[in-house]
Amino acid sequence: MIKNIFVKLALAVIIYMVALTGCKKDNGSGSGPLLGKDDAAFTIYENSFLDALWKLNPDWATSVGYHKYDSLLYIPNEQNRQKMMDFAKVQIDSLSRFEVNTLNEANKIDYKIMQNQLEYAQWQIQQLKAYEWDPSSYNVIGTFAYILNEHYAPLTKRLRNFYQRMLNVPLYYKEAEKQIKNPVAELTSLAIEQNLGGLDVIEKDFADSLKKTNIPKAEQKQMTDRAALCAQAIKGYADWLKALKNDHPRSFRLGKDLYEDKFKYEIVAANTGQQVFNAAVKRKKYLHGQMAKLSRQLWPKYFGNKTMPADTLGLISAMIDTLSSKHVKPDAFQSAIVQLIPKLKDFVKAKDLVTLDPTKPLIIRKEPGYMAGVAGASMSGPGPYDKGGNSYYNVGSLTGWSPEKAESYLREYNQYIIQILSIHEAVPGHYVQGVYANKAPSIIKSVFGNGAMNEGWAVYAEEMMLDSGYGNNEPEMRLMWYKWHLRSVCNTILDYSVHTGSMTKEQAIKMLTIEAFQQQAEAEGKWKRVTVSSVQLTSYYTGYKEIIDLRDAYKIKMGDKYKLKEFNERFLSYGSAPVKFIRDAMLAKPPASTN
C-alpha cells in the first residue's frame, strides 16, 4: 500500500477542499477568447493553476515537496468549501476552452486528469460530504512529521516553520468539532487512534530536534510552550470524540450510488465498480483451480502417503498452513526485510526487467504512529517537488502483541510472503514506480497521482518477478503468490460487497480465512480497513488487470519488436496517470505520413 500523500487525495478530502480556496486567475475568468490551441498556452495555464493551488493549500504543498508555505496552516470551514466550489467551476470552464485534441500526448493526459479531479472535488463537497462524518480527515500531524523528518532545508529553518505552523492548530481542531455532524463510529475510533498515535511528533520529537540547534533558550521555550498547547488541542479533539454522543451514527457503508461515483472519480478505470467486481469473482475461481493443481503436486513432498483432503479448499488450506509455518521471529521482521532489498535489486538487474536508479535512497523504518491502523506495511515516497527526498518502507511493529496474535501475523507474512510483500512495496513495486514518476516531466500526474495505477503496478510487479524466475520457479513460491494475489482479488470483492451491499463481518472473515486462506489476524485487520476506507481496496486488482490487458495489447502492436523492459519503462514514463489514459497513449497509431 502506497502512502504518498499526493496520491491519497480521496483520503484527505478536507485538504483538497481547502486547496483551491478562492483561487481565481485572470486566465480562468469565465469570459474571453479561447485560451489557446497549443501546448505552450496549456503549460502556462497549468503553471498558474499550480501556483495558486500551493499558495492556497500550504498543507498539500508541503506534502509534495513545495516548501514556500510550510509555516502556514489553514482552517477548514464552510466558507472555504464554497470558495472551492466557485473555483472548481471557473477552472472547469477554463479547461473547456482548450481543444484537447490539439494538445500533445502528455498534455492530453494532464487535461483529462485535471478535469476529473475538479469534478471529483465538486462531488465530494456536494454529494459525499465526508467532512461531516469522517473525523479522521482532520489530522495535522502528518505534515508536521514531514517538516521535521525531511532534510530539504536547514533544521533551524524547518523548526521555525514548524513553530509558526502550530499557531492555528487549536483553531483547526475547534473548527473540526463544528464541522462534524453525524460521524461514522469506526472512523471516529480511527481518528482518536491516529491523532493520539502521532503525538510524539509534537510533544517529544520537536523538543528533541530543538536541542540540536543554536536557537536561543528563551526562544526554544516559546516554541515548546506552543507545542504543549498544540498537543493539548489534539488531545482535546480526541477527548471530544470519545465523549461525543451519537446514538444513530452514519453507517460506514457508502451505498451503491455513492460507491460507483467514487469509483469513477478515484479509480478512473475503463469499467464500472460492478464490472470489476464481476471480473474479480471470476478471477478467484481461476486462482482456486491453479492452487489446487499445485497443492496436489506438492502434497507427497510434505505429507507423504497421508490421504489428500477431498475438499479442494481444504486441500489448499492444508498445504498453505504447512508452508506458512516457516517464518521469522517477531523481533526479526524488520531486519529480514532489510536483508531482502539488495537481493531483489540484484534479481531485477540480472533479468533486465527495469532500470534502477542507485541514487534514490530507500529507508526501511518502523511505521510512524500517525499512519497506524490501516495497513501493516506501506511506502511513503518523496513529493514531485522534492525529488531528492527519501522513500520510506514503513513496517508495522509487533511490539506489545500477544504471542498468539504475533504468530498469526507472521504465519501470514511467512518466508514466502515477506518476499512478495517487499517486491510489492519496494523493488520493483511502489518504490521503483515512485522514482520513475518523479522523473516524469508532468508534475500534474504526480500531484493527482492515480492509486489504481500505483497499486496495479505493484501487483503486476509481483507476478512479473515470478514469471521471470524469482524464487527459482519453486511451486511453493507460486502457490503462495496465488494466495497473496487472492488478497488483491478478494479486496475488490470485499470492498464492493460491504459498501454496496450488506456483507457482515462474519461473512467477510469467513471469505478471507476460508476462501482466501488468510490468517485470522490478517482478516480482522482487513475488516477494520474496509470499515474506515472505501474504493481504495479495489485499486490493486483493477490496476493490475488493466496493466495486464494493456501489456497483452501492446505485445500484439509491437510484434517481434516487443521487449518486456521496454514496455515496463515506457509504461512507467507516463508517471502516476490512470492506466486507461496510458493505454490510449501507448496503443495510439502513429500519425499518418504526409510524404
Image: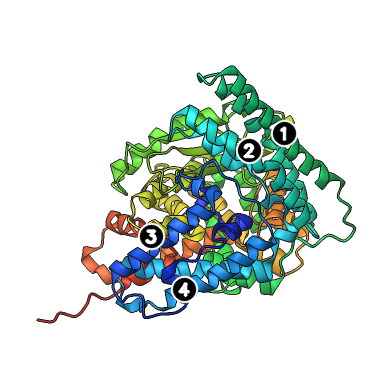
Type of amino acid at the residue the image marks with label 1? Leu
- Disc 2/disc 3 C-alpha distance (Å): 29 Å
Q: Position of residue 388 (x, y in %)?
A: 38, 39
In this rendering, the answer to whether 115 lies above or below 313 is: below
Picture disc at residue 47:
3
Residue that badge 1 annotates: 229
**Residue shown at 32%/72% (left/top)?**
587
Q: Circle 3: is it few (<14), some (14-19), or many (20+) Cα within 10 Å? A: few
Residue that badge 4 annotates: 29
Q: Position of residue 396 (x, y in %)?
A: 61, 36
Does label 4 or label 1 sit earlier along the sequence? 4
- Of helix, strand and loop, which one carries label 3? helix
In this rendering, the answer to whether 592 lies above or below 70 is: below
Q: Position of residue 226 (x, y in %)?
A: 67, 31
Type of amino acid at the residue the image marks with label 2? Met
Residue that badge 2 annotates: 166
Find out whether the residues at labels 1 and 3 contact each other: C-beta distance under 8 Å.
Answer: no
- Of helix, strand and loop, which one carries label 4? loop
Does label 1 or label 2 sit earlier along the sequence? 2
- Disc 1/disc 3 C-alpha distance (Å): 38 Å
Nearer to us in this view, 24 or 182: 24
**Residue 268 in view, yes or no:** no
- Of helix, strand and loop, which one carries label 2? helix
In this rendering, the answer to whether 425 lies above or below 91 is: above
Type of amino acid at the residue the image marks with label 3? Asn
**Residue shown at 49%/53% (left/top)?**
55
Report which quarter residue 292 is drawn in.
bottom right
- Of helix, strand and loop, which one carries label 1? helix
Q: Does residue 11 appear left or right of residue 240 in this picture?
A: left
Q: Position of residue 263 (x, y in %)?
A: 58, 68
